[in-house]
Image: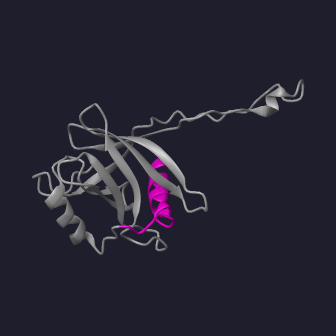
Amino acid sequence: MRTIVIATVVAVAALQCDAADTLTDIESAKQIIDSRGSDPLAGIWRIGGGGATVAFLPVAAGESEFDIVILDSPDMSVIPGQKIGHAVSTGKIGVYDATMAQKSTVGRKTVRCIITLGKDGRLSFAYYKQGYDVKLWRLLPYLFRVSVNRHDTRPSTVDGAVRLYPSTGQGGPVML
C-alpha cells in the first residue's frame, strides 16, 4: 500500500513542479549522470514494483546535492522530465535528506523524507514531519474527552526503489 502511495506522490507531484532543466528522455538523464555522477545515489530508479521512474541527477560534478526528476509514470497526466524534488547528503554516508512535491495544488505541498542507500544497493524512504500540532477542540470541557488517533504499525523503511541505471555489474537492475 505504501509503495502505491509513494508512486502516487511522485506521479502527482510532477503536475505542479516547474519545468526547469526539463529532460527529453532517459538517454538525456544518462548523459547527465555519466558526466556528473560520482555519488552512489546518482542514477535512474523505479519506485515500487511498477511505479514511477525517477532520476537523481547531481546538481554539479562532485557535489552531493541532487535534483529529483520524474522520467516516466503510470499516471498518464504526469509530464515526464519535470523536477519534483531535491535531495542533500547528510553527515552519514549513504543517507540523504529529501524534499519532494506531494500534491498538485495551488500551494505547493511537500513531503520530507530520509533516503537511505543500503550496503546491498537498496534505496529506502522514511518520511517525517516537522512543526507543531495544536488541537483547539481539547479546550472545550466535557465535550471531547475521548480523541480518535490513527495507528500505523507498518515499518516506515520498507518503501524502496529499484536501480535501473547505472548497472551494479550484476547483469541487470538490482531488485529490492
Instruction: Name the dominant secondary structure of the magenta segment.
Output: helix
- Establish if 45 lies above or below 130: below
Q: Position of residue 79 (x, y in %)?
A: 43, 72
Spot the residue most to the right: 142
Nearest the camera: 26 or 66? 66
Magenta residues span 1-20
Residue 9 covered by magenta stretch: yes
How many numbered dots are placed on residues in this image? 0
- The residue located at (51%, 65%) in the rendering is 16
- Establish if 25 lies above or below 30: below
Q: Position of residue 122 (x, y in %)?
A: 27, 43
Nearest the camera: 106 or 13? 106
**Which image quarter: residue 136?**
top right
- Establish if 133 lies above or below 74: above
Residue 55 covered by magenta stretch: no
Q: How is the image coloured?
A: one colour
Q: Position of residue 95 (x, y in %)?
A: 30, 37
Left or right: where 168 falls relative to 89: left
- The residue located at (25%, 38%) in the rendering is 94
Q: Position of residue 156 (x, y in %)?
A: 45, 37
Left or right: where 168 falls relative to 19: left
Left or right: where 145 falls relative to 95: right
Q: Is residue 166 visible?
A: no
Nearest the camera: 147 or 86? 86
Q: Is residue 168 visible?
A: yes
Nearest the camera: 160 or 78? 78
